[in-house]
Image (spheres, grey):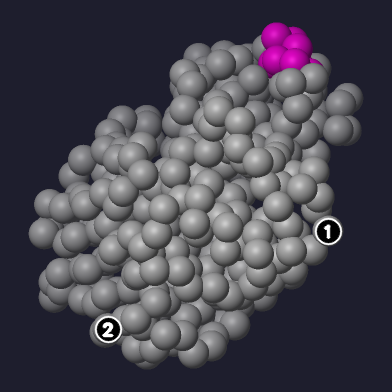
Amino acid sequence: MAPKNYPKAQALLEKFYAGKCTPEELAILDSWYDGLSNEDAAGMPAADATLARQQFLENFRSKLTPVRIAWWKRPVTKWTAAAASLLLLTGTGYWWLHQAGQKTAGFADKFVVVTNDTHAPKLVVLPDSSHIWLNAAASLRWKEDFNRQTRSVQLTGEGFFEVQGQTGKPFTIRTRDLNIQVLGTQFNVEAYAGEGLTRVSLVQGKVKVNTVKGNTTPAVLKPGYAAVYNNEDRKMGVSETEPAKVAAWKDGAFSATDLPLRDAVMRLCTRFGYSVHWENVQGADKNISVMFKKESFTKMLDNLCYISRKQYRISERQVTIY
């Protein structure tokens, strides 16, 4: 079943990417994938199509870090491959593969992936001695030949970077929406897959921030400033920030700066290994700014619910907001 015969496929893919597919919708994707054939892949030969799908799936899965719900931690299934194949067949994925993969050697790149499956910050030391602290459920990905010619990583979730300067070798970070280039600096990146914003907050040094699609003017940040990209209106703005709060999460604190209540609650619950169910969504999209010192999970959740006039109950590992 090709996408042109199934107009809802792209919408389902977007829900899958955001982690919002229902079991029934996952079953639809599963059924759709069963109907795929190698010849569907934009006229590519069967062998090339198979190789292309495998490579695209690897890149697609790298963006599906378990930020919101635990099923992203499960092994890949047919509907995961269906989502990757859908992107491939709708044109964007095929164009990327066709342009970047003319040489078969491009498919041989090997990657290192580190995911923080704990509730505490996780330190990652790269081959160039740069230090990255990953927040809960965050994931970092880089090529095995990192630092031989270039220094580039991909981030999903939140990470605090202390980058070692190297003349002639700028350090780059790619998220879903932003490309960040640095020489030697300290900064925090918020790039949660299920959220509509990406934020880069500079503590020390200098960074250049540009959108992946290049649809905005690049921003060069000074210490004490943050660049925020909104995925919905595709605009990026720069504003002042408080450096002391930027990486407070490394010490067990919790902060949310101009973030929708829904996302703040999700971040807190994800950090401690809980899922979230909303029975009362009134005001859930209202932006809040909070800073809680290191406390127990329930104490911080108490505070979030108090300021938003909501209550909660916990059953096993699920928090219900009402």
SS of the residue under disc 2: strand
Magenta segment main secondary structure: helix
Left or right of residue 62, residue 319 in this image: right
Find residue 55 and report its horizontal and vertical position in percent.
Answer: 45, 30
Q: Residue furthest top?
A: 34
Q: How many marks?
A: 2
Q: Amino acid at mark 1?
A: Gln
Q: Amino acid at mark 2?
A: Gln
Quadrant hosting residue 286: bottom right
Q: Is residue 20 magenta?
A: no
What residue sits right under mark 1 in the picture? 282
SS of the residue under disc 1: loop
Residue at (79, 20) in percent of width and height: 24
Quadrant hosting residue 220: bottom left
Instruction: Tell me the distance, in whole angstroms, between the alpha carbons under discs 1 and 2.
Output: 39 Å
Residue at (70, 15) in percent of width and height: 30
Q: Is residue 32 magenta?
A: yes
Find residue 35 and report its horizontal and vertical position in percent.
Answer: 74, 10
Residue at (73, 31) in percent of width and height: 21
Find residue 125 and report its horizontal and vertical position in percent.
Answer: 16, 53
Name which of mark 1 and mark 2 comes first in the sequence. Answer: 2
Relative to 214, does residue 226 appear above or below in the rendering?
below
Within 10 Å of disc 1 (Cα), the crowding (few <14, some 14-19, many 20+) is few
Res 204 label:
2
Please say if the residues under marks 1 and 2 sit with CB atoms less than 8 Å apart.
no
Residue 179 visible here: no
Span colored in magenta? 27-35
